[in-house]
Amino acid sequence: MRWFSNLFKARDKPHNHSFGSSYSFFFGNSSSGKSVNEFTAMQMTAVYSCVRILAEAVAGLPLHLYKYTDTGGKEKAISHSLYFLLHDEPNPEMSSFVFRETLMTHLLLWGNAYAQIIRNGKGEVIALYPLMPNKMSVERDARGNLYYLYTKTFDEMRGSEKTSVALKAEDVLHIPGLGFDGLVGYSPIAMAKNAVGLAMATEEYGAKFFANGAAPGGVLEHPGIIKDPQRVKDSWNKAYQGSSNAHRVAVLEEGMKYQQIAIAPDQAQFLETRKFQINEIARIFRVPSHMVIGYVTRYVLLCWRF
């Protein structure tokens, strides 16, 4: 009976697997019917531009390591080993800019940013490597101590049979976003998936609208009986469907008539809905809407140019 009671609970919100654990999408479709997650959301230009604006802004900030002086002031600790690690190269594969940009992208999409801390035999930090948030969960052991459980993919196993590895709390740099327990943040995409799903649905509608030659729906009326209606339909679509065939002169034979039954985009407030969803997504990330619109416009013009 307990299993059945849990079955009918609300599943459209991210849930904790345990104390401070990671969340997941249950039945991830939004109210618009579109499947929304962190990867599909990045296909939206508004989400992509918000994430890129914030990630590049944070990554471009100066990052220095300071130490206190005997006089009570501070100065750059250039000779410290962590200075080069944070300011120049966290690991041999990434610059400091790319590392911080990656962590900020994870934080904006998943609500958490993780990095593994690599130490040498002396216990000194020698590298930082980003970890994918969707593969990480935060758990507690029998003593109540936090530890991180990272699920490895096939290419990360490298011959090992273990599919997951437990990491100590001191070996993980964890930056949580907004959450309810102070340990793990919740994904902005998961919490606002209906807004993102509506934006995806309107974008798909617009794409199909122009793919159908700006005439998305209608019927062909014939005064008599058509022996092969499928052939007539295929012939009509071949000649007039698609944006390349828009505004062509249609030739109707044998008393046939074309009756459009679709609602005009302006009547459905299609453009107004798209503009509102851009502002809605910008509000999720607290980015001024004019910055998002300007970025989207430049992105579209750049793609059009090339």
Image (cartoon, rainbow, N blue to C red):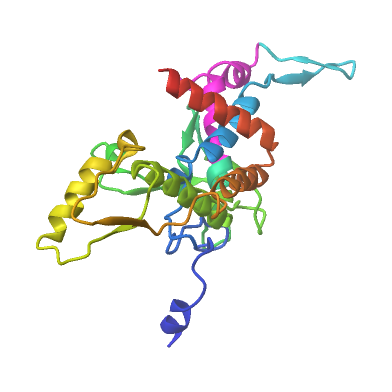
Taken as a whole, is the magenta stretch helix, strand or loop?
helix
User: Is 267 situated left or right of 201 in this image?
Assistant: right
Residue found at x 40% / y 46%: 209
Magenta extent: 79-107
| Residue farthest along the bottom direction in this orientation | 1
Q: Is residue 123 visible?
A: no
- Residue 179 seen in this snapshot: yes
Q: Is residue 106 above or below residue 31?
A: above
* Residue lying at the far left of the rendered structure: 227
Q: Nearer the viewer, residue 273 or 298?
A: 273
Q: Is residue 86 magenta?
A: yes
Q: As rendered, which of 148 and 293 lies closer to the eye?
A: 293
Give the residue drawn at x 45%, y 40%: 43
Residue 111 position in % (x across, y down): 58, 47
Left or right: 162 as drawn, with respect to 37: left
Q: Quadrant of the N terminus?
A: bottom left
Q: Position of residue 255 (x, y in %)?
A: 23, 57
Which of the 4 image quarters holds residue 75? Answer: top right
Which quadrant is the C terminus positioned in?
top left
Q: Taking 253 as reference, is 18 left or right?
A: right
Looking at the picture, does residue 60 appear above or below residue 186?
Answer: above
- Nearest the eye: 219 or 195: 219
Q: Is residue 126 shown in magenta? A: no
Q: Is residue 143 left or right of residue 73?
A: left
